[in-house]
Image (cartoon, coloured by chain):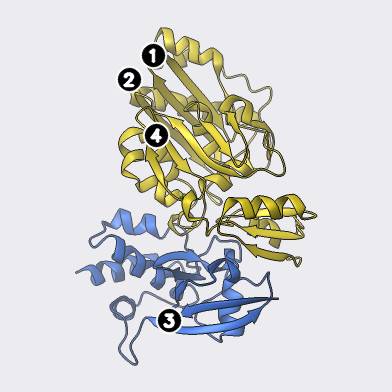
Amino acid sequence: MAKIDIKINGKGYSETIDDNILLVDFLREKIGLTGTHVGCDTSQCGACVVHVDGDSVKSCTTLAMQVNGKDITTIEGLSEGDNLHPIQKAFQNNHALQCGFCTPGLVMSAVDLLQKNKNPSEDEIREWFEGHICRCTGYKNIIKAVQEAIA
Amino acid sequence: MYNFKFHKVDNIQDAVAILSTSEDPKILSGGHTLIPTLKQRLSQPTDVIDISNIDDLKSIKNNGNKITIDALCTHSQVAKSIDVTTEIVGLASMASQIGDPQVRHRGTIGGSIANADPAADYPAAVLALDAQINTSSNSYNSDDFFVDMFETAINSDEIITSIDFKIPKKSIYKKFRNPASGYAMAGVFVAIFDNGIRVAITGASIKAFRLHDLEKKLENNFSVDVLKEFNVDTTNYNSDIHASAKYRGNLVKVLLEEAVAELV
């Protein structure tokens, strides 16, 4: 067992955890933040993307202990009460989700894209989402949503 | 995943000390190869030593005739570095083609080179840019470094600390990605130096290697015509579920033609 001190969505947590627990399992099972999903569990699908110190990363391929002391943002940390984050709002406006399983990861990646590149081209958006899979194949509206969020 | 003891260190001496005294330790940096390996139970270390907090292994320096990249630099950092994008275009381009953006935020150059995956991209850059690999206690020339599949020349108590890449006049990396994994089905790195040309191939065989005969031919006549007449020897090429040796040989030839055409 190991001791972790971590900030998640602005709130500090101090927990005792297994040395080998993945960040995504820690978030879901220990902290109860189930918005971050486990899809493929092999860093291919992107359903598990969260931010670590501002960078979008795949939490299924990160040990919780690796990010001890870091600042984590999950999908639950984006909205302010009932006020959705502009990316969430754009996903809603453009029907950029069907089943919704891949959505939390895509939203987190989109937020990271726009904080690094204020005006990405369609190609740059598509390239940024290379590590995401939407099994409903709703990519077109996902791209539209990001484009609306830029505008 | 099997259980293990997790260690976090903030200096290389502590990492080496744990590495030397543990039963079956593994070094963890970005974890984007090791963690999938642990999940699949292909590896069962007793101790995992996380070196990602060693802050003095995270910078990129331009030393005039070479660029020194510390082992903990992420692929994203290498791809965006002003020094790398201006001085070694092929290396920056190569780093930007690894995995996907989220993977590139975690995966590190030191981890990739230490792992020596036969389909990884960095080994081609190491060979073509005549890199020197520096470890906690030694340094290695590129041509002596990759020994076999997933096997390098470093000893079990050594940790890669930095890599010195020679700055070429021109360089390029061309890769044919596996559509699912993004790994190189074949990748070619061509670098032009004042004193010669270096051509390295990854993804095609058990380890990255140079094409010495082609290098000599290109030194005499740097043109696509040389490639047209060049026969790729696929004797030691891999055949697997992704591609036959013959297919990989053809990929190498096509990629080399494209690379040379762009550098002429």
| Subunit of label 4 | B
Q: Which residue is mark 1?
A: B222
Q: Is residue B75 left or right of residue B209?
A: left
Q: Is residue B157 left or right of residue A133?
A: right
Q: Residue at x 45, y 68 (%)?
A: A52
Q: Which residue is mark 3?
A: A9
Where is the N terminus of chain B found, in terms of image quarters? bottom right
Three-letter residue code for mark 1: Phe
Tell me: residue A34, above or below residue B136: below
Q: Mark 2 vs mark 4: give the one in front.
A: 4
Q: Are marks 1 and 2 in contact (CB under 8 Å)?
A: yes
Q: Mark 3 vs mark 1: give the one in front.
A: 3
Three-letter residue code for mark 2: Val
Could you tell me residue B14's position as x and y percent?
Answer: 63, 55
User: Which chain is drawn using yellow?
Assistant: B
Three-letter residue code for mark 3: Asn
Q: Residue at x 52, y 56 (%)?
A: B54
Q: Name which quarter of the figure residue B263 lies in.
A: top left
Could you tell me residue B95's position as x and y percent?
Answer: 44, 44
Residue projecting furthest to the right: B23
Query: How far is the residue under mark 1 from the one under mark 2?
Result: 7 Å
Q: Mark 3 vs mark 4: give the one in front.
A: 3
- Nearer to the camera, A25 or A71: A71
Could you tell me residue B23's position as x and y percent?
Answer: 80, 55
Query: How far is the residue under mark 3 from the one under mark 2?
Result: 52 Å
Q: Residue at x 56, y 36 (%)?
A: B134
Q: Which residue is mark 4?
A: B90
| Subunit of label 3 | A
Q: Are marks 1 and 4 in contact (CB under 8 Å)?
A: no
